[in-house]
């Protein structure tokens, strides 16, 4: 298995690599939202090394779909967190939002 490429997650969260890895290993599910113009991206961690990026526009479904990339080998997400993320991707708010 190849090493995870954290570059996009680092850019979206504004964290450095050490901060990002600590955040993904603190056993607390969490996410950070970056909204720029019409684009929205969310970096989610399950707190157990799992990391995903949600992008509000995707190639096949345009703005009616969401692209989901798993950065780590796996990532778990609670139903409630997934629903929250899907709803937040469609709501307007500031450039950066931190779930907790």
Image: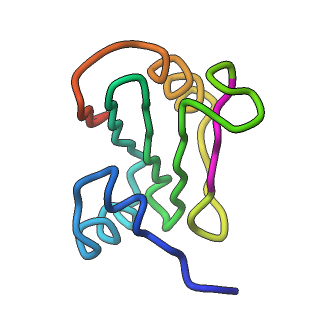
- In the rendered structure, which segment of residues is drawn in magenta? 65-69
Q: Is residue 65 left or right of residue 11?
A: right
Q: Quadrant of residue 96?
A: top left
Query: Does 52 sit above or below residue 58?
Result: below
Q: Is residue 58 left or right of residue 88?
A: right
Q: Nearer the viewer, residue 37 or 44?
A: 37
**Residue 75 is inside the magenta segment:** no
User: Residue at the spot x=23%, y=61% of the render?
Assistant: 15
Count all numbered tags in the image, as a single digit: 0
Residue at the extreme right = 60
Q: Point out the image quarter for the C terminus.
A: top left
User: Residue at the spot x=58%, y=68% of the render?
Assistant: 72
Query: Does 12 sit above or below residue 64?
Result: below
Q: Is residue 57 left or right of residue 89?
A: right
User: Residue at the spot x=38%, y=51% of the render?
Assistant: 28
- In the rendered image, residue 23, in percent from the top left (x then y), is placed at 31, 61
Q: Is residue 86 left or right of residue 99?
A: right
Query: Does 89 sit above or below residue 33?
Result: above
Q: Main secondary structure of the magenta part?
A: strand
């Amino acid at each position: 298995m190849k090493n995870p490429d954290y570059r996009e997650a680092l850019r979206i969260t504004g964290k450095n690599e050490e901060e990002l890895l600590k955040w993904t290993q603190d056993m607390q599910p969490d996410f950070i939202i970056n909204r720029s113009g019409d684009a929205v991206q969310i970096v989610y961690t399950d707190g157990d090394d799992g990391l995903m990026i949600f992008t509000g526009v995707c190639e096949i479904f345009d703005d009616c779909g969401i692209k989901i990339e798993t950065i780590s080998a796996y990532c778990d997400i609670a139903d409630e967190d997934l629903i929250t993320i899907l709803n937040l991707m469609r709501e307007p708010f500031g450039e950066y939002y931190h779930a907790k």
